[in-house]
Amino acid sequence: MTVFSSDPGLGHNEAGILMLGSSPAPGRYHLGLSWDQGRAPNIKPSADMTAAMVKGEQAVDFRFDNPALLSPPKDAPPRYQWQRAVEYSQFADWPTISRHFAPMFAKAATLAANSAVKREAVRIAAAQSRPLDRAAEALKLVQQDVRYIYVGLNGGNLIPATADETWQRRYGDCKGKTVLLLALLSEMGIDAEPVLVNSGGNDDGFDQRLALPQLFDHVLVRARIDGKTYWLDGTLPSVAVPNPQLVYSASWVLPLTSKGNTLEKLQWRPATTPDEINLFEIDARAGFDKPARIVSTEILHGLKGLQKQMQFAPVTAAQLLDFFRQNAIGDTFQSVDDVKWRYDQAAGASVLTISGTGTFDWSDDGASGKSLALPGGGFSPPERRVRASDQNQDAPFYTKPDYTCFVTTVRVPTSTQARHWSSKSSFDTRMFGRAYHRAWEMRDGAIRMIRASRIEQPEIDIPAAQRDNGRIAAFDNSMGWISYDPAGKKTSIGNGETVPTTYDFDWTGTDVPCRAADPR
């Protein structure tokens, strides 16, 4: 049986991927591609498919009997996982794709003379004088008043519904929302364009691929406002404002323009603000054997924060309190008195705070001495970067970028003296592209600790990996212990660092002191 199909979004071009995969079940496999005379596509097989390719005048075939398992190099960048794949495309290059889709979006963003969208643009312009504020209001309108629903029928998987249709329906997918936003911005004289992205961040190596529209799964708006670039995504919650930084961890984007743009590389830089900050306050002033007051705060930035906003925004305060009373009470909390959640739009962060009481199991060190391992205070040693002998020994080693920070403050029992307290050592080092930092200070009756981990170099070469393999044995993987010794004569906490507490510093800001000035 032969089934003919045609995608109106691709026009006379075809593009796609034949994929066998690295670990197919045993059996006989046949992959084939054929074309009409004069319609030969560009074909790019992965290296492991080249030997099996049989090329005819108007076809290519690949046959396998019980194909062997393939393993990508361990801990290699994602582009090394591209195995047993054959790309084909009748698009000559990326600018051709850009020029192909740009008119679809331009046409869909063209409003009718009596369009209700025009009236919305006039209303926004009258209420806001600054272009950035106008763009923010237009974005909020698209996010809040148009539900997200995927539209894929009748070519809708690639061709956007018009702005007027989307506004009338009050629903649309990323294409429809993008077109509606483009129309609003255009009415207000704001320069903007649609841009294709891979929202999952699975775009490492796109510059090595053929021009394939299928590599992208999302479209949003990039605007130029007052000389600066902003990203606007109509599919995000309405708390997501125009952002100078793309919220997705994308490396490559494709602007859709009439002149035809090629792939653009987004410059990666280490994060300056942690993706996740966990604050933990232990108020043990009543004594070692008394329940301690606990305040735990989770601050999530970026996409994680937006996901938490979508999860918690519909939940009432009573429901939130009941949920955490059911699920948080256990090893740490023995009671939960209050739960507060908010989304800090200025900081672009979800802030969840849980307050309650708990009893900590202070270790008995004898002679009235006590010790406690602080939550979030220790580091696990990194794994050695090595590969099996049959794997690519030249591929760099990769770690997915992240930046986390743990801040713990202990208000020590008032019956103790500062000079009798000590802690594990401070810690600053860089291994396998990751910076490790731990700092301590005791001041005003409180022991303060910060522990942070940040990827500063996602890919490291083989010599760097071998050098750091030799340093693992000396890695300080101790937990964040604090100790009280009434016979002690001198405090031993930190190396002179200044560490704020969890409660006297705004940890939602961009200047959080979670990094060492110069990690070794």
Image (tube, grey):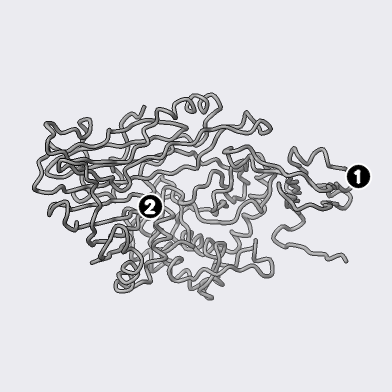
Note whether 26 is above or below 174 in the view shown.
above
- Count neighbours of disc 2 (C-alpha within 10 A) and say few if under 14, some if 14 to 19, many if 20 or more: many
Whole-percent x, y for residue 234 in the image:
48, 62
Whole-percent x, y for residue 460 in the image:
52, 31
**Location of the N terminus (image quadrant):** bottom right
Mark 2, secondary structure of its residue:
strand
**Closer to us: 104 or 427:** 427
| Amino acid type assigned to the residue bearing label 1 in the image | Glu
Mark count: 2
On screen, residue 26 versus residue 319, left or right, reads right
| Residue at the image position 50 percent from the left and 26 percent from the top | 464
- Count neighbours of disc 1 (C-alpha within 10 A) and say few if under 14, some if 14 to 19, many if 20 or more: few
Whole-percent x, y for residue 446 in the image:
16, 45
Note whether 227 is above or below 436 in the view shown.
below
On screen, residue 401 versus residue 91, left or right, reads left
**Closer to us: 208 or 319:** 319
- Disc nearest the viewer among 1 and 2: 2
| Residue at the image position 26 percent from the left and 63 percent from the top | 334
| Amino acid type assigned to the residue bearing label 2 in the image | His
Note whether 412 is above or below 423 in the view shown.
below
Instruction: Give the CA separation, mark 1 to mark 2.
Output: 54 Å
What is the residue that sits farthest to the right in this orientation?
57
Residue receiving disc 2: 301
**Location of the C terminus (image quadrant):** top left
Q: Which mark is residue 277?
A: none
Residue receiving disc 1: 57
Whole-percent x, y for residue 372 in the image:
25, 45
Give residue 352's quadrant in the image. Answer: bottom left
User: Which callout, 1 or 2, points at the residue further toward the start of the chain?
Assistant: 1
Give residue 92's quadrant in the image. Answer: top right
Mark 1, secondary structure of its residue:
loop
**Closer to us: 294 or 456:** 294
